[in-house]
Image (spheres, rainbow, N blue to C red):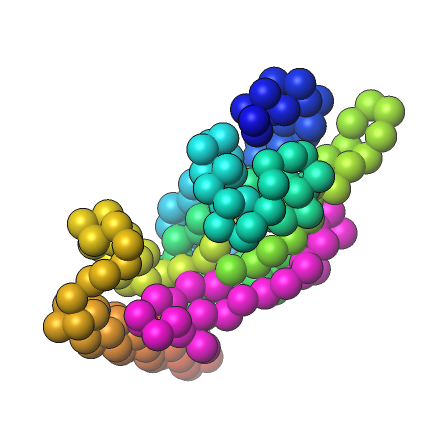
Amino acid sequence: MLEKELKAWPKLLAYYQMAAEELESDLKIIDMDWKIRLGYSPIEHLKVRIKSIDSIQKKLDKKGYSANFENVKLHVLDLVGARIITSFEEDVYLILAHLQERDDYRILKVKDYIVHPKPSGYRSLHVIAEIEVVLHHETVWIPIEIQVRTLAMDFWAATEHKLQYKYPKGNIPEAAMIGLQQIATTSQKLDQGMSLIRQEIIQRTQEEEQE
């Protein structure tokens, strides 16, 4: 049913495609700008994607909504998504601050799973926003989701995701769940340790420059 509607709404789909291209372009420009001005970019890797029809259908079913475009626009706010990977935890919030300062992004909601991890141990920063897409005759705002996390957080999340496929209904054995939580704690300590080392290096460099 949804697939038939999607074929009948090429314009709306085009808006989401344009939003994805705009988002990817913006992030690449941010990355280049930081490298040129500061000699360093907090962005290690980035990936932009658009949900498949099957994923959209499943999300609406899970939320109990019928498959029509009105519900897609209202309840599938992550149809366009980006994942940004950083080296350091503080860089996650540097990227958030930059997005909050821009006029072409409207931040709707921030879910901070770094400060408040999920029970499983999952950590990441999720930003629900709208991105401005300027067309010839109009300007439209398209909902997007941006996930920002460190390399350590991403490694944990990717591995946990593979285990979810092994146990498709989320019935991961209790021992494995405890192990995942312990590894998540270790991952957090790794991030904190790397940040401390970075701060020490920066401080030492600044002291040497002042001598």
Q: Residue at (73%, 47%) from the top-left corner?
A: 104
**102 within the magenta span:** yes
Camera-side residue of 119 and 191: 119
Camera-side residue of 66 and 52: 66
Among all residues in the image, which is located at the extreme right? 137
Camera-side residue of 37 and 146: 146
| Residue 172 visible here | yes
Q: Residue at (45%, 70%) from the top-left corner?
A: 113
Q: Residue at (59%, 65%) from the top-left corner?
A: 110
Left or right: 56, with 152 as reference point: right
Question: Where is the N terminus found, in terms of image quarters?
Answer: top right
Q: Does 36 appear above or below 117?
A: above
The image position of residue 75, as x and y in percent, is: 63, 49
**41 within the magenta span:** no
The image position of residue 97, as x and y in percent, is: 61, 64
Q: Quadrant of residue 118?
A: bottom left
Q: Does 106 appear above or below 204?
A: above
Q: Does 8 appear above or below 205?
A: above
Q: Residue at (21%, 53%) from the top-left corner?
A: 167
| Residue 151 visible here | no
Q: How many marks?
A: 0
Camera-side residue of 208 and 71: 71
Q: Does 4 appear above or below 62?
A: above
Q: Quadrant of residue 195?
A: bottom left
Left or right: 147, with 77 as reference point: left
- For the record, the magenta segment spans 100-125
The image position of residue 202, as x and y in percent, is: 39, 73
